[in-house]
Image: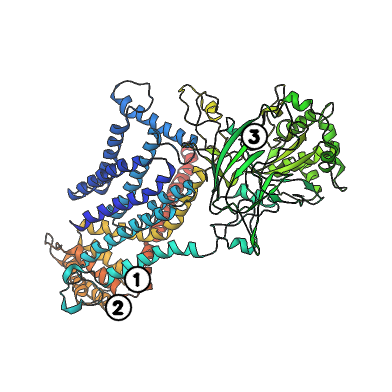
Amino acid sequence: MSGRAKLTLFAALATLLTSWSLNALVDSQAWLLQAALLLAVQSAVGAGARRVPLARTLTVAAQVLTSLLLLAFLYAGKGESHGDGPLAYLVTDFGALFGQGVRDVGEFAIPAPLTDGIKLLLVSGVLLIGLLVDTLAVTMRTAAAAGLPLLALYSVASGLAGGGGASWFAFLLAGCGYLMLLLSEGRDRLAQWGRVFGAAPRRGAADSGLAGGAGGQATAPVKFGRRIGAVTLGLALAVPAVLPSLGGGLLGGTQDAAEDSGGGVGGTISAVNPLVSLQSNLNAQDNRVVLKYRTNSPQQADQYLRILALDEFNGVKWEASGRALVDVPEKLPEPPGLRAPVSRSAVEVTTSISAADYYTQRYLPMPYPATSVEIGGKWRFEPAGRTLVGDQLGRDKFQNVQGAEYTVRSLLLKPTAQQLQSAPKPDPAVQEEYTKLPDNLPPVVAETARQVTQGAKDDYTRAVKLQDYFAVNGGFRYNTRTASGTGPQAVARFLADKEGFCVHFAFSMAAMSRSLGIPARVAVGFTPGEKQSDGNVNVSMRDAHAWPELYFEGVGWTRFEPTPRSGINIPEYSRAQTPATQPSAPAPLPSQSVAQPSTGPSATPECPPNLKKLGECGAAAPAQSTGGGGGPSVTSVLGWAALAVAVLGLPLLPMLWRTRLRARRLATGEVLTAWRELGDTAWDAGVLPDEALSPRRAASRIVELGRLDEEPAAAVHRIAGAVERALYAPPGAEVSYPELADDVLLARTGLLASADRLPRLRILLLPRSAARVSWAFSARRSAIAAAVSTRLTTARLRLLRLPLRGRG
């Protein structure tokens, strides 16, 4: 197999190995085999076109045409088109399926089901990257630059997938593929040099150029390159596991040192006051999945996972008051305040939850109100807040939820608006404890609460009016970039600015409810998350949320939703009984998706997309990722990938320009053009050009200053002799010779070999002859300026002559 054929094979293999990282985006790997077959055909077409040989542009065109025909043949007829005939079958239908794939990407959460549209996008993307790699590595002979499209492919896949347990394996495959491509290209270049500059073969083995000796063993340069690649990959995989993590946790940036040492990837999570860091997690780019669960609840959109309740506002911040902990009973006590008939209509649901290894929260996320919990480890129960807290395991070390798998049985309460409206006065002890407010609370809080609830005759109506004031008709905007604040003045500032995130809305409504005599507290936890195609629900870092809980006798602690955020499910019992206007200026949360109560794709093709995303189409709809809850948005990932490619590609532009210019010059077979290339090559190596010297003197100067060996020196003199014949031979004499291009490359090899490592790297990446680009640009600009000046002068003279002609 020739060197170029091997390079073609390894270019396709590098693309295929990097494409493995896309597997995490879908729930099936069946697409990869089809992509491998089409990639093989595309590479074979390129190899055949180069062997003919065809021009580079025709080679790329043949590959593109073949790939498009294969895709149209495989996927035509699977989309929805309304035309007739072959054109509609091959083009219109093909485009419709491509558009359907784009819509599927925006609809399904990761890992998405492998629909025909998504499969087409994946295969097309792999073919596109494969074409770029093949063009750069084989057609353009710049294998190093072929790493840029490979990097873009891996960056997009890794960014959308958000990492995972197998991410190191995907990186290892991509890195090995790129290194094999570089090794193959290096072997091909060494073979063209004719000999290896390195240690002599051992035991008198003959120099075989590439093999380096008998038995086909690699010589020093090849072995050294392989060792560098292996060490680099090893360090890239090992160093992140050894160095301490710099990222913060979900609901806190730091924790005790002992708990930090408890293991896990990433930062730990504070169990004291999650409100402090909830804002940073809503804005975080690292949207890792911290919890996964399955539930039999018929209302999964109401399946909030509650961590703890903050029931004390001390004038500085909301926090959980210190309460006594007890052993976890086999069956948890009845929820406070729950009475018939609400308790009789309650349905017990079961939720199985698993926590990520890097999630080290001491409080156990659970649906509210839980009736029993099955979990291993040492846990304690706090009855008032109905939360489970990790017990102390040793000095400064506590039980946490890291990697835990547990099952929670909880009640799905279905109170009606009439039951809440007719609720009796709460227990005096509850009324006294949960309506306390600091003395320094600004009067505007209570005044605004009275104004908003004016005319309401019961606590339920007041609560609904407060909720609607924040979420519907008060002109508030959701903005996670707003400074959170902690003291009582933070509520007053929020009411004046009317901009904030869930923390502001939760503690403001809780404070205003207490000012009206309604028992209230702030709950912290997670919204229901995103349902996946396999039935699991993923809860990620940006699903963190805070909401107020208000107490109604007969129902107990009841959730309200004042936050005007897209994807938030307002409880049915708290919705206004009359049609309400839309929120005045809700700012959508880019990371939150609508929680889905359904279990699979909609079977009704007529279902509009907006109803499908709300689960209103009969059959269940899959979890959506339109809010980006499964990771960074596609636009941001593509933008960062393009920026990375641009930053990495800028240093390679001079090298790519020189490579392209060299190939064009040597392809002409003209002696003077080859001599110009030799002069630029010597200039890159530090031998400044001197136009006053004869070809023979110039060749001697290149040999002397370039410290060339015998073979490269002879090549330079042969080129100089051809130049003299071209300049002084009689017309019609043959001055070129077949080995002209090879002599130029041999001379270049000698100049590179005589340079040290750093100068050699500068010669490759920053060639001095690249200054010709600037000179050519300046010359072109001067020529254009001169032409424009000449035309303006001519036009002015003609205008000056017009009056004279008029008088004549």
Quadrant (top left, top right, bottom left, bottom right) of the N terminus: bottom left
Q: Amino acid at mark 1?
A: Arg
The location of residue 24, given as percent across then percent down, is 43, 45
Separation of disc 3 and disc 1 at Cα?
A: 72 Å
Disc 3: which residue: 411
Give the secondary structure at mark 3.
Answer: strand
Report whether residue 692 is seen: no
Disc 2: which residue: 705
Single out the mark in the foreground, 2 or 1.
1
The location of residue 177, given as percent across then percent down, is 33, 56
Disc 1: which residue: 760
User: Could you classify mark 3 by the number of other residues whose Cα lies within 10 Å: few (under 14), some (14-19), or many (20 or more)?
Assistant: some
Q: Amino acid at mark 3?
A: Leu
Of pointers 3 and 2, the one earlier in the residue sequence:
3
Q: Amino acid at mark 2?
A: Leu
Separation of disc 2 and disc 1 at Cα?
A: 15 Å
The location of residue 501, given as percent across then percent down, is 68, 43
